[in-house]
Image (cartoon, coloured by chain):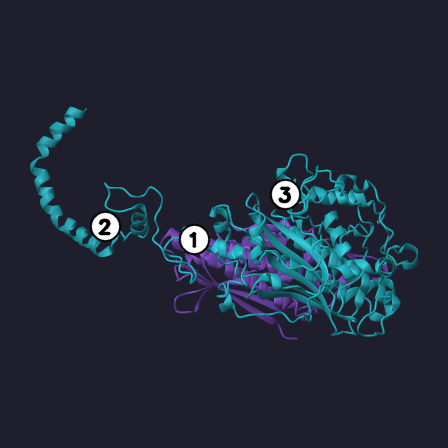
Chain colours: A cyan, B purple
Amino acid sequence: MLPYAMDTDLSSQDRKDLDKFIKFFALKTVQVIVQARLGEKICTRSSSSPTGSDWFNLAIKDIPEVTHEAKKALAGQLPAVGRSMCVEISLKTSEGDSMELEIWCLEMNEKCDKEIKVSYTVYNRLSLLLKSLLAITRVTPAYRLSRKQGHEYVILYRIYFGEVQLSGLGEGFQTVRVGTVGTPVGTITLSCAYRINLAFMSTRQFERTPPIMGIIIDHFVDRPYPSSSPMHPCNYRAGEDNGAVYPSVEDSQEVCTTSFSTSPPSQLSSSRLSYQPAALGVGSADMGYPVLFAGGLNAAHPHQLLGPGKEGGVPPVPSQPAHGTQADQERMCTPLDGVHYSAATPSSSEDTETVSNSSEGKSGSPHDLLETIFIRKVGAFVNKPINQVNPPDSPETESPLQGSLHSEGSSGSSTGNTHDDFVMIDFKPAFSKDDILPMDLGTFYREFQNPPQLSSLSIDIGAQSMAEDLDSLPEKLAVHEKNVKEFDAFVETLQ
Amino acid sequence: MNCRAEVLEVSVEGRQVEEAMLAVLHTVLLHRSTGKFHYKKEGTYSIGTVGTQDVDCDFIDFAYVRVSSEELDRALRKAVGEFKDALRSSGSDGMGQISLEFYQKKKSRWPFSDECIPWELWTIKVNVVNLANEQERQICREKVGEKLCEKIINIVEVMNRHEYLPKMPTQSEVDNVFDTSLKDVQPYLYKISYQITDSLGTSVTTTMRRLIKDTLAL
């Protein structure tokens, strides 16, 4: 049994269920976050019948290597007070410069809700929280960056367990709370801290900024054990054989068969979860995606930039998730129909790899390596007001990467860009000086970008000309009547 | 029981109305939809799976997630399309509001019709702006995108307060709480209505549109 801050009156079955929910919630959280940074649109199908493999009644695919990394980081433990699961999203340019964009934190605090029903309310609220996570992952600035990743930069992820490390986000980062779920052993909180001084490093600037040449960049986040939690690209390609084929992890494919009861709490025995370990059909052969690490660690492949949909021969899981979902279902081979909806049989069908078992075998050094030396209390985010978004005055605290990108951006900016740290210079497009025309291209562009309204379209002048036209009509008619014979002769020549 | 009411306000260009409304409505319905219920014996039920998909906006720098249900998407598009047409044809300053109301049905004895008791009301107030040139339109694309991000965060914050939700119904009561007419997902019973405001600030037209057959006629 895992140590929790508060001793509760939870039954052992409730405790097991809760551990399971939290574990799979953590795994699904990681999947949602990483998949949202793949750079592709995600699409999964609704299914009117429960498939048994969709935790929290949501169709969220499991990328095996992501699950593997998450489990490696968790090392059999669960988020608890002082031990948070964090997913760090960062950006790495093709030149090897990197910058942290956001940190997603799954935390647990000591505030317990002992009255809450585990197998029903907690489960449904975790499902709701996952939906919120799906929504929020699309509104932070890193989403748009990730959609445009490619040749200039890639988005990487890193999962770690322990104290939250926010120092790499720079000053003035913002936090958004995705949601909380109270449980009998503590309150689960999911939040995101994201860099906001990215605002002036928009994706457009990334696209038009020329490669940084000849600048010594020494910006790496000060991680105490960099080799223990390497960065991974959020997109990936198969077909590269570096030996890192990941076995399909048994309990990520574990069947989640949930039946709920509309009866009063005294009849909860009919609403237990029953777990049936999935028969591993095809196994990992078709889902063995080798992981290409960041450029510094794998110099042979500095540009792991192509999305799965762009690489030939890649099983395009994210781009065709509908097929992938079917493949997963076929792989699961779950004998569900007519079996699992009755009262549960926890002892007969429980999986062997419970959290408590795995923690016994895996405690020790992997856990120690993942804890950091930062002394920071959970929840004590440094939250500065938004008016401190501007780069700090002291150059030591901002990365050289940011400084160089600022200067590159300002040289090409128009006079409409009035950022404090930029130097205002005239917009001088190349080859724009022309002796014939009195103005350059920039001046021409500015003058004619907002042309004044045509005078003929203004109401007053139109009204005046209309009145004049009407007044002059009788005279014109009289003239035309005099020349009727000439007009007739002209018409006859046309016939 | 009081009905929980939330109001969101957006200022958009005419061509952005549809996407902005769909983004907000879909985000709310993502949180207020479950998989299909399958009732079994002994009062137990199991729940189907809700799929999701990303939607990119064409006129706004924004993307959102919606439930993977073409029926639900069609229903929302129809309602939003009517709202957009009403806004356009009203000839007013382009102000209106669209409301998404979640309700429960309470069966009444004959000869009274069923009562609809709202438990959550989302109102989106829309102000349509006219822009003069392409530069302003580009700025508007980005600004509306940022505003919608804020609205999504607001919606998520409300959803995760875990305030009142209808109790899970028995099989006989499920149609009083959920819309079971869709084949792949099951949203809570909802209705969408809109109002167009004229320049004096009074309501000119009120159109109630019931998207589900809910009221029994006498």
Q: As rendered, which of A480 and A247 lies closer to the eye?
A: A247
> How many numbered marks does the figure carry?
3
Mark-to-mark CA distance, 3 and 1 = 32 Å
Mark-to-mark CA distance, 2 and 3 = 58 Å
Work out whether A376 lies above or below A296: below
User: In the image, A232: left or right of A283?
Assistant: left
Badge 1 marks a residue whose secondary structure is helix
Q: Residue at x 65, y 34 (%)?
A: A312
**Residue A176 shows in this picture:** yes
Q: Hey, what amino acid is under mark 2?
A: Ser
User: In the image, A3: left or right of B121?
Assistant: right
The residue identified by callout 1 is B138
Q: Residue at x 81, y 70 (%)?
A: A4
Are discs 1 and 2 both within one chain? no
The residue identified by callout 2 is A456
Q: Hey, what amino acid is under mark 1?
A: Gln
For the residues labelled 1 and 2, say whether their Cβ atoms are less than 8 Å apart. no
Q: Quadrant of the N terminus of chain B?
A: bottom right
Q: As rendered, which of A409 and A7 lies closer to the eye?
A: A409
Residue A241 is situated, as x and y percent measured from the top left of the image, at 73, 38
Badge 2 marks a residue whose secondary structure is helix
Give the foreground label among 3 and 1.
3
Task: Please give the chain letter of the residue carrying mark 2.
Answer: A
Residue A150 is situated, as x and y percent measured from the top left of the image, at 57, 44
The residue at the far right in this view is A348
Mark-to-mark CA distance, 1 and 2 = 28 Å
Residue A128 is situated, as x and y percent measured from the top left of the image, at 69, 62
Q: As rendered, which of B111 and A81 lies closer to the eye?
A: A81
Q: Categorize mark 1 by other alpha carbons within 10 Å: few (<14), some (14-19), many (20+).
A: few
User: In the image, B218: left or right of A205?
Assistant: right
